[in-house]
Amino acid sequence: MPKEIPTDEKSVRERGTYANDGNDPTLASYLSSLFFLLSVPAFVTLAYVGYWAGLYGESTVVPAFAGLLLAGLAGVFAVMHYTTGR
């Protein structure tokens, strides 16, 4: 019988929490998730900060957000490309 079925010796939570295989989270996966969660709110805030600072008009907030989003994605792509060497 396979060892991966739930038994009394280890609960499902313990098997998932203490897994030691290739699917373990890495620093890169944590940073990727952090970027995914925080990038849009940060870019929206930055776009409005530019408007509140008087750098551009209200009609330019959405294009400023789009530019920040594209620049952020291009930056992440460049970092991933450089770090993986591909």
Image: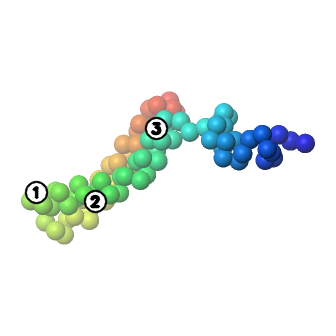
- Name the residue rendered at 53%, 36% in the picture: 26
Residue annotated with mark 1 = 53
Task: Identify the secondary structure beneath mark 1.
Answer: loop
The residue at the point 30 percent across, 54 percent down is: 42
Sequence-wise first label, 1 or 3: 1
Mark whose residue sits in front, 1 or 3: 1
Type of amino acid under label 2: Val
Residue 44: assigned label: 2
Question: In this orientation, does residue 3 appear?
Answer: yes
Give the mark nearest the N terminus, 1 or 2.
2
Q: Residue at x 51, y 41 (%)?
A: 29
Residue 80's mark? Answer: 3
In the picture shown, does residue 19 fall above or below 54?
Answer: above
**How far from the left and from the top, in percent, is residue 31?**
44, 41
Question: Disc 1 versus disc 3: distance between alpha carbons?
Answer: 33 Å
* Kind of residue indicated by mark 1: Ala
Q: Position of residue 64 (x, y in %)?
A: 24, 59
